Amino acid sequence: MSTLPVYLYGNDILKKKAKPVEEVSNEELKLIKAMFETMHESNGIGLAANQVGELKQILVVDISEMEAGKGTQPLVVINPEIVDEEGESEYDEGCLSIPDLRETVKRPERIVLRYNDINMKEREMEADGLMARVLQHEIDHLNGVLFIDHLSAAKRTLLKSRLTKIAKGEVETSYEVVVNVPKKKKR
């Protein structure tokens, strides 16, 4: 099993925009396999590459164990772009990088996604419901956006102490994590 540590809230890499992938080499294939293993081991349903320390536009999704995802196949998405969206829905979201915190987030109900598959073939798919939500959540990660960034300033202020604890690693997880180590100030 080759799981990777998940970067927690407070790590700079979570706020950076991932770079497009030009080709899928053995390095990317190993990363994708490890991302699936990490996601499954962590009981997640989606994972973006920057959550495991790689600034590459790669995400994986597997909602097949969820009631709303019965019959779906695990999905690898490279260089995603949402080309259309409609409707609006609210859902309680969580994140492996922000453990033990769930909040209601508004997102489009349906999206059309253009992306490359694992063979770098361009694809387009429509998604709604849970699949659309997970894809949007993970694409946000690739753009340096966290689900808490969709909350009101007042709500984020109320969550500040919990987020500070998460950033310090004062949270229990069943998976390995990377805590942001603040740089020492020069005197």
Image (cartoon, rainbow, N blue to C red):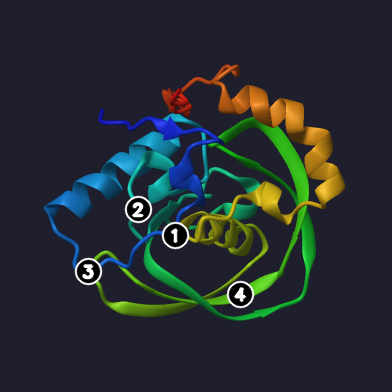
Q: Residues within 10 Å of mark 2 (few under 14, many from 20)?
A: many
The three-letter code of the residue at mark 3 reads Asn
Decide which of tag 4 and tag 1 comes sooner along the chain. 1
Position of residue 107 relative to residue 100, above or below, is below
Quadrant placement of the N terminus: top left
Do the residues bearing badges 2 and 1 touch, measured as CB atoms within 8 Å? yes
> To which residue does mark 2 refer?
55
> To which residue does mark 1 refer?
17
SS for dot 1: loop
SS for dot 2: loop
Say which residue appears at 16% left-offset and 50% top-offset. Answer: 27
Q: Which mark is residue 78?
A: none
SS for dot 4: strand
Q: Is residue 67 visible?
A: yes
Do the residues bearing badges 2 and 3 touch, measured as CB atoms within 8 Å? no
Say which residue appears at 43% left-offset and 45% top-offset. Answer: 13
> To which residue does mark 4 refer?
111
The answer for how far apart the CA atoms under marks 3 and 4 are is 23 Å
The answer for how far apart the CA atoms under marks 1 and 3 are is 23 Å
Do the residues bearing badges 4 and 2 touch, measured as CB atoms within 8 Å? no
Question: As rendered, which of 170 and 90 lies closer to the eye?
Answer: 170
> To which residue does mark 3 refer?
119
